[in-house]
Image (cartoon, rainbow, N blue to C red):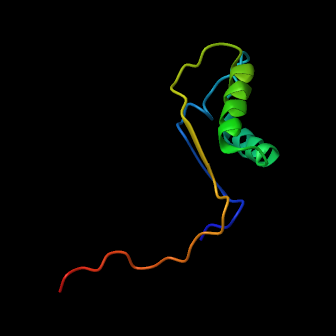
Amino acid sequence: PFERGDWILLFTDGVPEAVSGKGEPYGERRVQSFLQSHCRLEASEFNRQMLRELEAFSGRGFQDDIFILSIQIKKEPARSREVFSPSR
């Protein structure tokens, strides 16, 4: 279950596969490190900063699509309840 402060981060493979001028991929470790060091930002600002980070890292245009969706859990999730009951 999700708790307040948790993040859901979805991204295309173009994010970890972004390549530097030296041919080095950005990688999932850098994605994780970026999330840990920027998790206090609002989700929209997090996305902007991550895109800037990727642009600075690559130093050139991207070779693949880049899509980032971040969701930050701000409230305690409501208890789940049955909202659908199949007819008998």
In the picture as drawn, the residue positioned furthest to the right comes out as: 37
| Residue at x-position 78% and y-position 43% | 38
Between 16 and 76, the one nearer to me in the picture = 76
Q: Quadrant of the N terminus?
A: bottom right
88 relative to 73, above or below: below
Q: Position of residue 34 (x, y in %)?
A: 76, 41
Instruction: Report how many numbered discs are placed on residues in the image.
Output: 0
In the picture as drawn, the residue positioned furthest to the bottom comes out as: 88
Q: Give residue 87's quadrant in the image.
A: bottom left
29 relative to 63, above or below: below
10 relative to 13, above or below: below
In the picture as drawn, the residue positioned furthest to the top comes out as: 60
Q: Quadrant of the C terminus?
A: bottom left
Quick check: 45 left or right of 69?
right
Q: Position of residue 65 (x, y in %)?
A: 51, 26
Q: Position of residue 69 (x, y in %)?
A: 56, 42
65 relative to 82, above or below: above
| Residue at x-position 40% and y-position 79% | 82
Between 51 and 60, the one nearer to me in the picture = 51
Q: Give residue 70's quadrant in the image.
A: top right
Q: Give residue 15's quadrant in the image.
A: top right
| Residue at x-position 65% and y-position 38% | 44
| Residue at x-position 69% and y-position 21% | 55
Q: Position of residue 14 (x, y in %)?
A: 56, 31
